[in-house]
Amino acid sequence: MIEVVSTVIAGLYVVQGSLGIAEQRVYTDAQRARAPLLTTVNPAVAVLAVGIGVVGAVWIRLRGLPSPWYFTALNCGLALTLFVQIWLYREIGVSHSPLFDRVSAHLN
């Protein structure tokens, strides 16, 4: 059961990282100027999240969990990527993802 949950969490890494990568195109120059370090770090964290998610899911599928602590490490890593994103939102002065606004406007 823990392998299934760990695979789902690895999938969440891929989704969260993919959204983080897509979100980088939506930021304005003014928003990037408010947080130059974070707008550089956040895409790197997003790419890392996608890589960890893919490698983690494949590893679990082929070899099982490498350690009982792997599940905890996946959860902590996912939380860290989310904290970086929340920090970025606060620094650039938005309450939620600008990607959400763009998709919402496109659908309406």
Image (tube, rainbow, N blue to C red):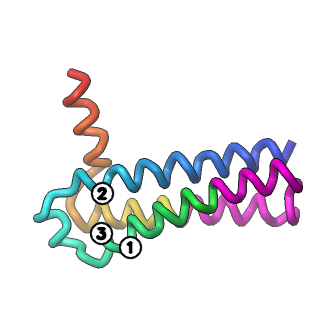
The residue wearing badge 2 is 24
Contact check, label 2 and label 3, Cβ < 8 Å = yes
Q: How far apart are marks 3 and 1 (CA)?
A: 6 Å
Question: Looking at numbered disc 2 in the image, what kind of residue is underneath it?
Answer: Gln
Determine crowd level at label 1: few under 14, some 14-19, many 20+ residues with C-alpha closer than 10 A.
few
Asked if 80 appears above or below 22 in the picture, the reply is: below
Contact check, label 1 and label 2, Cβ < 8 Å = no
Please tell me in which quadrant of the rendered image residue 50 appears: bottom right
Where residue 76 is drawn, which disc sits there?
A: none
Q: How would you classify the magenta stretch by its main secondary structure?
A: helix
Question: Looking at numbered disc 3 in the image, what kind of residue is underneath it?
Answer: Thr
The residue wearing badge 1 is 41
Looking at the rendering, the stretch of residues picked out in magenta corresponds to 54-80
Asked if residue 87 lies in the magenta stretch, the reply is no
Residue 42, position as x, y percentages in the image: 39, 67
Tell me which numbered mark, 1 or 2, is placed earlier along the sequence. 2
Say whether residue 88 is left or right of residue 27.
right
Asked if residue 62 lies in the magenta stretch, the reply is yes
Say whether residue 8 is left or right of residue 62.
left
Residue 31, position as x, y percentages in the image: 17, 63
